[in-house]
Amino acid sequence: MAKKGDMLYAWTNDAGLAKKAECGGAVTELLKYALESKTVDAVLAVKRGFDLYDAVPTIVTNPKDLDACAGSLHCGTLLLSKLAMEYVPKLSGKKLGLVVKGCDMMGLLELAKRKLVNLDNIVMIGVNCGGSVSPVSARRMIKEKFGVDPNTVTKEEIDKGQFIIEYEGGHKGISMDELEEEGFGRRSNCRRCLYKVPRQADLACGNWGVIGDKAGKATFVEVCSDKGADLLSRAVKAGALKTEAPNPKGIEIRGKVEGAMLKLGEKWRKKDFAALSKDPWGIIQKETSRCIKCYSCIENCPVCFPVAEDLKSKQYMVKPGEVPPNPMFHLRRFAHISDTCVNCGQCEELCPMDIPLARFSHAIRAEGDAAFEPKLGKSAYTN
């Protein structure tokens, strides 16, 4: 029987799923078992849309349909926490399963504090995350740096410090450091992230630390809650999964990979925030002067919730009709999320004017955390 604190290698017993999924298919198998055993009533999953640059959220109630959601989509930059908040009321108190990255997890923790989701009714399988790449940027990067038609790419992955693609006729990998120094690679918020393994989920899974004959064929699983231990134990007992103790060297390597990612995040924070610190309010005013007041930064933020009166009038903190808006539009928004920004990057990702909004809000949040106790506590997470 698994228990909280355990670490192990796990892989599916379904040969078909193992072939399609990554790292042994343990994550997909756990979600399938959760549906089959009625542990959850539905799974909020992500599947490939038109191509690998298109990630589509979907609600799954039939376990067989989860096979279509197997595998990763590093060029799909969805945030699932706010989607979960929207789906939970529609499920009328039923239980929901989902896979969470660090930013998804932080968003859910903030929503739970506002009583907008009940974590008791959510089974969360966390995955270690080195970052994601914006789809438009990814296509341009593949064309210009890899010399490959992005339409011919059939698979992508981030592994061993490289962005790797498989395409019609071959495969190729380029160092992420090289890509990012030239303005490509991961989204800026992902570069700054210091929450790589979401251990506030019920299970934390990934490929970091899987070595030897199980490399690429199994998932490293950390059991983070009693709920996660119960799900994993029952899945193994039912024959859905196989497990074994992890290679001790693999545990050491997992820690080193995570540590290296954290150091890289600190490097990017220093670089991004130092550039901003020279004239923060002048830079913010200059950049936000392009704002067309589309409200995307508010509507897609997992922690920015206007009061009811503003929702009714669509005023969102300041009067409508001013384009560009009064500078207080953004300053009040930054103040509103100053202690809760989770650095998910959705405000910047979806801004039609390419304003680096995530850098601004994250810098404010990071400065506040340096001076005061973080809102969720230092033991909860570091974003």
Image (tube, rainbow, N blue to C red):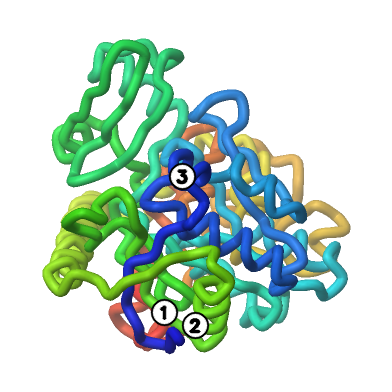
Asked which secondary structure carries label 3, the reply is loop
The residue that mark 1 highlights is 223
Up-down relation of residue 39 to residue 170 (above or below):
below
| Residue at the disc numbered 3 | 21
Mark 2 and mark 1 in contact? Answer it, CB < 8 Å: yes
Measured in 3D between alpha carbons, the distance from the residue under mark 2 to the one under mark 1, in whole angstroms, is: 6 Å
Per the rendering, the mark at residue 229 is: 2
Residue 145 vertical placement versus 334 (above, below): above
Residue 40 sits above or below residue 353 on the image: below
Q: Earlier in the sequence, mark 2 or mark 1?
A: 1
From the top left corner, tell me how far across and down residue 342 is, in percent.
47, 65
Question: Where is residue 267 drawn, in percent x and y?
Answer: 16, 56
**Quadrant assignment for the N terminus:** bottom left
Which quadrant of the view contains residue 274? bottom left
Nearer the observer, 146 or 243:
243
For label 1, the SS is strand
Amino acid residing under circle 1 = Val
Which one is nearer the viewer's eye here, 84 or 51? 51
Q: Residue at x 69, y 54 (%)?
A: 63
Q: Quick check: 307 above or below 191?
A: below
